[in-house]
Amino acid sequence: MKVLSICGSPRRGNSEAILNKLKEFLEEKGVENKIILLRTKNIHRCDGCVEYCNKHLKCRYRDDMDEILEEILQADGLVFAMPNYFAMPPGIFKDFIDRCSVLYTSYEFTKKPDLSNKKAVVITVGTDKEFVTACKNYIAKWFCETLRLKVVAKEGFLSRSELKGNYNDIFENSLNPDILERLRAIAEALASP
Ligand SMILES: Cc1cc2nc3c(=O)[nH]c(=O)nc-3n(C[C@H](O)[C@H](O)[C@H](O)COP(=O)(O)O)c2cc1C
């Protein structure tokens, strides 16, 4: 059982801390877990030349997305974690989403990777519950479900504003008293057959 976690924060912050904790819980259950930090990857922005990926079933750009797509295809489960910026994912995660369209175009047209047996989890963070929830639901429905991934959990966690000097305090900020239980439940959902 292999789970690939993808962190969509442009900084070493709450999303990354959450994925590190989830990794501990997954490994306790014997699940292999790799975390990919998009902020450390070179991912060319999709420039919409759909003619190419429709015909070749891959992007015309050779960059870190080649390896990430391969890892997605090898994984049994996928975790997407990110902050919300204006109720949307940060630009680096949106760039990743757009480059995943190779999976979608191939799905529509010809030899398609079947992602329907892969579990997916969406985790979003932010200061405002309504925004966090909107982002979480949006990624689960319009990204994961479009790719036919099986969403087994979606969670939103609250952070305190970094504009007021708070940073990376998701486990100490007292806004998510049950965060460990919720992460354990995610690990269980991913690990169970
Ligand atoms: C550019 C920017 C825009 C943000 N917009 C929102 C927002 O609209 N709603 C919200 O709840 N939080 C917003 N936040 C707060 C972040 O979502 C929050 O600090 C989150 O914990 C950051 O996650 P990270 O530590 O994983 O990077 C914003 C932060 C930044 C930097």
Image (cartoon, rainbow, N blue to C red):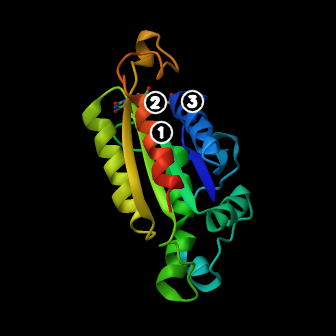
Which dot, 1 or 3, sits closer to the camera?
A: 1
Tell me what residue is drawn at x 55 percent, y 89 percent: 110
Give the label on residue 184, or none: 1
Tell me what residue is drawn at x 65 percent, y 82 percent: 56
Amino acid type at image mark 1: Arg
Amino acid type at image mark 3: Ala
Element assignment for label 3: helix
Tell me what residue is drawn at x 36 percent, y 22 percent: 177
Q: Residue 26: where, in percent of width, then height?
A: 59, 44
Query: Which residue is disc 3 drawn over?
Result: 17
Q: Pick the quarter of the image with the N terminus.
A: bottom right
Q: Is residue 46 visible?
A: no
Tell me the distance, in whole angstroms, between the alpha carbons under discs 1 and 3: 14 Å
Element assignment for label 1: helix
Give the label on residue 180, or none: 2
The reply to whether discs 1 and 3 touch (Cβ–Cβ < 8 Å) is no
Residue pushed farthest bottom?
A: 110
The reply to whether discs 1 and 2 touch (Cβ–Cβ < 8 Å) is yes
Q: Residue 173: where, in percent of width, then height?
A: 42, 16
